[in-house]
Image (cartoon, grey):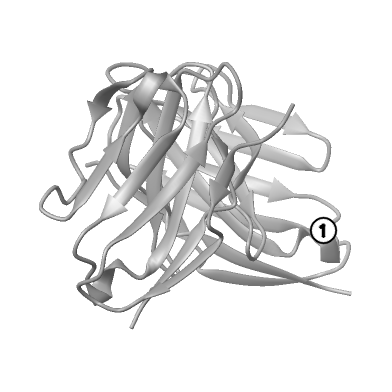
């Protein structure tokens, strides 16, 4: 119940295309869902986050779509660029107790020039 | 503002040896986290501090791992003795408080021979 399942494991997209990464969870107590971007040799960096009271959040080319009933959320990267090539992690946490993050297994994105 | 600082960046040791990692969180951040990131996986929380107190160490292998956060600022994570399965990147993160977004350092890559 504490797992966050992420797919696909890897993704190749042409420059200018849309990258879509999906995550699913079981625990309905989760109520904060951040996405992190990680470049090789670097730590994860917060990209965008959403709470279940909204169905969509957009920041620049990055959009999170959230489906509370399906217990799924996804990251859309519009107009994907070679500089977006990185590993993306979704995570989930509960607004109680320690608020600890449960991370997905990651998606390695490669954007072709 | 300066980010989370970690050292060393890389460490190579033989199994059964001991090793220590150091983390300096972002100034003013009360919550500090240590994560283990095995190649190809998402970060896994090892221990979470609130100021200098432990709030979650449920996934810390306490027979070999220890961590402390003296004076509520810097933290050290120690492994003694190391096993081959401990080869991973050890990430430190901090947040202003436990319900605030987490900011990661670039980690220490540990290789066990």
From this viewpoint, is residue A70 visible?
Answer: no
Which of the 4 quarters of the picture holds residue B111? bottom left
Write the residue at 38% across / 17% down: B51
For the residue pair B10 and A37, the one nearer the viewer reads as: B10
In this picture, is B60 found above or below A18? above
Spot the residue most to the bottom: B113
The residue that mark 1 highlights is A80
Q: Can see residue A98?
A: yes
Q: Residues within 10 Å of mark 1 (few under 14, many from 20)?
A: many
Q: Residue at x 77, y 32 (%)?
A: A59
Q: Is residue A2 left or right of residue A58?
A: left
The percent position of residue B14, horizontal first and vertical second, equals 30, 79
SS class, disc 1: loop
Compared with residue A43, is residue A62 higher up or lower down, i.e. above or below?
Answer: above
Q: Observer-nearest residue: B28 or A53?
A: B28
User: From the image, which quarter does the C terminus of chain A lie in?
Assistant: bottom right
Question: Does B32 appear above or below A97?
Answer: below
* Host chain of mark 1: A
Which residue sits furthest left? B63
User: Residue at horizontal 53%, vertical 57%?
Assistant: B8
Residue A52: image location, x then y, percent: 49, 22
Which of the pair A47/A5 is nearer the observer?
A47
Q: Position of residue A97 (x, y in %)?
A: 27, 18
Q: Is residue A83 left or right of residue B93?
A: right
């Amino acid at each position: 119940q504490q797992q966050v399942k992420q797919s696909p494991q890897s993704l190749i997209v042409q420059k200018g295309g849309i990258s879509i990464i999906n995550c699913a969870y079981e625990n309905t107590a989760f109520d904060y869902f951040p996405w992190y971007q990680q470049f090789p040799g670097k730590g994860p960096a917060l990209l965008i986050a959403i709470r279940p009271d909204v169905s969509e959040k957009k920041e620049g080319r990055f959009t999170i779509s959230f489906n509370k009933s399906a217990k799924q959320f996804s990251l859309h990267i519009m107009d994907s660029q070679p500089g977006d090539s990185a590993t993306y992690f979704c995570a989930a946490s509960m607004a109680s107790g320690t608020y600890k993050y449960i991370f997905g297994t990651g998606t390695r994105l490669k954007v072709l020039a | 503002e300066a980010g989370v600082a970690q050292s060393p960046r890389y460490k190579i040791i033989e199994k059964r040896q001991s090793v220590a990692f150091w983390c300096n969180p972002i100034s003013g951040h009360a919550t500090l986290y240590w994560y283990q990131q095995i190649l190809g996986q998402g970060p896994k929380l090892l221990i979470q501090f609130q100021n200098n107190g432990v709030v979650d160490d449920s996934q810390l292998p306490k027979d070999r791992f220890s961590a402390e956060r003296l004076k509520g600022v810097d933290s050290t994570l120690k492994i003694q003795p190391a096993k081959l399965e401990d080869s991973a990147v050890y990430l430190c993160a901090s947040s202003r408080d436990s319900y605030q977004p987490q900011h990661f350092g670039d980690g220490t890559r540990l290789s066990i021979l």
